[in-house]
Image (tube, grey):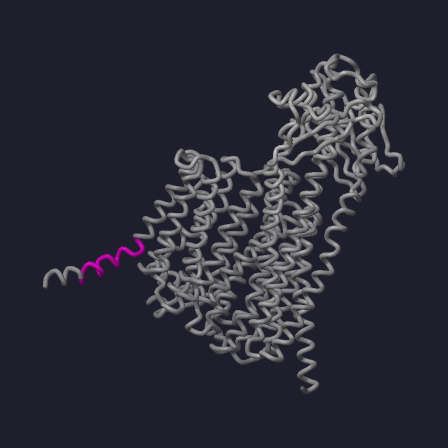
Amino acid sequence: MSGGAFYRRLIDAGTMFIVAALSLLLLLYVGFAEGKRTYEEIELEKVTAQAIFVQNSIERFLRDGLPLKQYPGFATLVGPIVESQKEVDAMGLYDQSGRRLAIVVDKSNPKLPELSSAITRVKQKIEIEYGDTHYQVVVPLRTRFETVGAIVMMVRTEFIAEVLRASFLPLAFLAVGLAAAAAIVMSLAARYRPRSRDFWSNIAHGMAFLSMAAAVVCTLIVLYFDGVQGKIQTSTFTFSQRLHDIVAFDLDFKDFDGLNNVFEEFRRGNSEISQAALIVDSTVEVISTDHAKAHKAWVPVPSDYEFKADLSRPDGPRSVGVAVAVPRNVMVERVARSVKNFAALFIASAFLSGLFLQLHEALGGAKSPSSESPKAGPVGDSALLILKPIFFLAVFLDSMTYSFLPKFMQDAAVASGMSTSFAAMPFTAYYLTFAASLIPAGHVADRYGPNAVIVIGVILAGASVFGLAMPIGIMEMIGLRALSGLGQGMLLIGVQNYILAVASPEKKTQGTAIIVLGFQGGMLSGMAIGSLLVSFLQPQGIYAISGAIGVATALYTLALLPSLAERKQATSGLRAALQRLATDLKRVVTDGEFLKTMFCIGIPAKAILTGVITFALPLILVQQEYRAEDVGQIVMLYGLAVVASTRFVSRLVDRTRNTEFILFWGAIMSGAGLVLAGLMGSHLLGNGLLSTAVVMVGVIMVGIAHGFINAPVVTHVGHSALATRIGATPVTTTYRFLERGGHIAGPFLVSQLFLIWGQGPHILAWIGIVTAAIGLLFIVHRFGSWSRPVQAEAAR
């Protein structure tokens, strides 16, 4: 083996190691961040439940008309909580002005932060302030008529950080080991199986990613189970301490009134608990939340988790304790719900991991920019491989802002003295400039080549998002969003023209699928990652990262994307160019076949995306009392189905060249999916799991249907008779321009339907019926040609 070959293989293996390590560490970071968010929520639920228990005890005193400053037993009440829980450093009692009346501090005498300003503006609800060293849980105290003070619980943030580090640090070493193993497999494949090198690289990368995902999921399950169990155990122990004095002085529980109410209050404050009881000598005392079990032996139920706190005196004549039962399905459901929330982030990580792998393949197969135009075949395939990450990253950097951008714009409008409705202007400006840029960008790409259009589009998209990090007002934000729409429109046309130039005839639809897959993958992963990072970095941090991604993508494009040297020289001035544009537009919009495709397939699909999937469906799901995370995950099924079906359909179209029937079935399936979604909550399905399953199937069907439409419809108009006469570029560019009417009209039309017929699932069903009927109109001309052979046969 020559030294040069060994050196190249070593460099290739090192690149594979870096790519695999980035993918696995990204997945690990996403798992860590989601674990922190959920475990933090569980821990704060635990301490908040105990603070509410203290709140109820003090408020009983206040409702008797006694002043807060005379409450006698604060230290006795909260002492067991502070001493038994490592994360709680202190609990204080404060009046309405913020003056401290009492405080209990842990024996380690920790350094406490400054008191939260929320103490001087106590509200009706509990507030949690997230500080650098402590969480401050502010719990209001009310009489029958007013709020008179608050309890403040100081909880160490380092406690949660220590638990998370202990859980996730071993996974960092596992990620490095898996990345090294993937690099070794790729290196061996390059030496012994050079023709199947890419196949084995994908297998090694995929196996490493799935192994890492399994390890992260197992870690999250253990972490969440420990958190939920710890919450119940701690709450049980703290509650039992209220009964300690009764046992210590050997008193009879029957002599104390109201203990049943205390147990009921404890159970209501801990929603996971199904029952709680006082156990004396293995028998349930009269005090129990399940009165049917009083005076009976305590027998654990196999389907429940049991937690006990022993109160017996070492030398006492009887065994006393508090027992609580938690149904296993409740804990499993809580843990499964938390792990399910990680699934969306896992999918986003998978898309980004695939992007890293594409970058590795592109870097391995990239050639230095040439003045020669790539031709159909291997060189064109290599150019398409380099092109994929460009469009993905451009969509990704903009989509990272989608989860918080509406609220950010609303706050900016209010800060600028405008009404909250003015926050819609930046989004309107974005779509208007996006649509307005498509046809001019197509002509620029024809005359100067798509590379320049792509680079300028990426720069404008990244710079416009980065500009939002600056201290600007709503008017400046409108300008930046308009600039972002211009950049994204130019990028779309540049990528589309590049694909048409380099893709071989038998792979035109697969080339167009780059746009569909890049858009869906970039949007899904961008929204998921952006919504996760914003809680750590704030919106300005996300804007800065998006700008950096834009710069890196532009440099990647300039360095690796082969140039197309065949440029059309300008033969006339601006006036002649505008006349040509008007002529092309007139030819396109007066063609009956083109209009039929546009109004029966293209515009309805885009209107369903913006009007139903992203606007109406979330509103209706919330109306049907679905959780926020469930709504997001149901909507996410649409994008995943689009991605999955697009890969299959694009190859099918290129093989069969029968775009008409593919589009027809896309319209029919889209309508059927909407009808299924419209059945949610009906008398036929009810509001249970069956209704949810039907909605999920319906959304997936719509996603699959749009995979039948998004890429094939561009191929359909690009191969039409009109495209043969005036050129594929004017036809496809005009199509992209006009289909934006569906984007704009979708939310407006659906909102009008809500006003006329009410907001409900039935609207989705009627939209589905109309969509299927329009799909039949698209192919109705075929019915005559089918019937003629039948009539001829009958005439014989």
**Quarter of the view holding residue 205:** bottom right
Q: Nearer the viewer, residue 268 or 654?
A: 268
The main secondary structure of the magenta stretch is: helix
- Can the viewer see residue 745? no
Q: What range of the chain is rendered magenta?
A: 777-789
The structure residue drawn at horizontal position 70% and vertical position 85%, both measured from the top left corner, is 3
Q: Position of residue 51 (x, y in %)?
A: 74, 29
Nearer to us in this view, 631 or 200? 200
User: Where the C terminus falls, by quadrant?
Assistant: bottom left
Q: Residue 710, image x and y in percent?
A: 44, 58
Residue 444 visible in the snapshot: yes
Q: Report which quarter residue 39 is drawn in.
A: top right
Q: Does the magenta-highlighted stretch encompass residue 213?
A: no
- Observer-nearest of 257 and 352: 257
Q: Percent x, y for residue 363?
A: 62, 73
Number of disc labels: 0
